[in-house]
Image: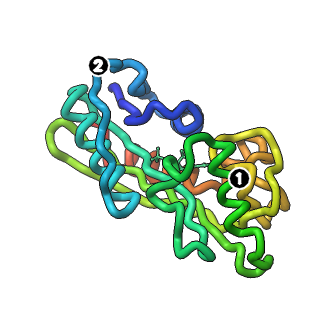
Amino acid sequence: MKLVIATGNKGKISEIRELLNDIPIDILSLTHFPGMPEIIEDGAIFLDNALIKARFTAKFTGHPSLADDSGLEVDALSGKPGVLSARYAPTTEERNYKLLKELESVPDHLRTARFVCALALARPDGFEWSTTGTCEGSITYSVSGDGGFGYDPVFYYQPLGKTFAELSREEKNSVSHRGKALRAFKKAVLAENLLK
Ligand code: IMP
């Protein structure tokens, strides 16, 4: 059985591969389908965008497709960058810098934030399944750590006393928004035979 991961983001692909490595499926990603047109992600919420990506990919590839739409919601910025997380500034470094700058004068107790991951599965026969995972944390005052990707160096996870970029891959997967959503997916795959 093949499953196409509807993303070209290498950080997401490797985390998803690692979390699904114990189920017997052949995992492909959009790097295997270079001719696929770019998908317009114009949904208002993470789940809308995940469904848009999963449906389009299933139709284009003819295989069950799993899409992750994820990002960071910062309370002091009324939930921004939210669905615009990937487009908040041109590069990862600039996005993190912009966020730290915007929160420059925000005190500790108001720096709360969460990562959100909406996962959607779409099959060519029209079947759909979805779930959402979240992870609560806060925004640091400077970048710290070189693991992970994206906003990991500015996201402080209090229970482990580190930023996500300072965690090992196993530690991040065990507590992250994506880890939680993928464990729910895995459970449903095994219990409900989602990938037929
Ligand atoms: P998407 O590809 O539109 O879902 O964009 C998600 C963006 O949210 C990524 O490019 C990252 O900037 C950010 N993001 C999502 N998940 C994570 C994570 O686990 N760590 C850090 N940043 C993340």
What percent of the width, then of the height, locates residue 83? 44, 58
What percent of the width, then of the height, locates residue 2? 34, 26
Location of residue 196 (image quadrant): top left
Q: Residues within 10 Å of mark 2 (few under 14, many from 20)?
A: few
Mark toward the start of the polypeptide (1 vs 2)? 2
Q: Residue at x 69, y 50 (%)?
A: 152
Up/down of 72 relative to 110, above or below: above
Q: Residue at x 31, y 57 (%)?
A: 43
Q: Residue at x 38, y 36 (%)?
A: 6
Compare residues 17 and 154 and report the one nearer the observer.
Answer: 154
What percent of the width, then of the height, locates residue 189? 38, 44
| Labels 1, 2: front one | 1
Give the Cα separation between the discs numbered 1 and 2.
34 Å
Up/down of 21 relative to 177, above or below: above
Query: In the picture provided, is 93 more to the left or to the right than 116?
Result: right
Q: Which residue is mark 2?
A: 35
Compare residues 123 and 106 and report the one nearer the observer.
Answer: 106
Q: Amino acid at mark 2?
A: Gly
Q: Residue at x 79, y 65 (%)?
A: 159
User: Does the image show residue 95?
Assistant: yes
Location of residue 141 (image quadrant): bottom right
Q: What secondary structure is marked by label 2?
A: loop
Tag 1 near tag 2, CB within 8 Å: no
Q: What secondary structure is marked by label 1?
A: helix
Residue 97 disc label? 1
| Residue labelled 1 has its Cβ within 8 Å of some atom of ligand 1 | no
What percent of the width, then of the height, locates residue 166? 81, 47
Up/down of 53 relative to 72, above or below: above
Query: In the picture provided, is 182 more to the left or to the right than 173?
Result: left
Compare residues 14 and 7 and report the one nearer the observer.
Answer: 7
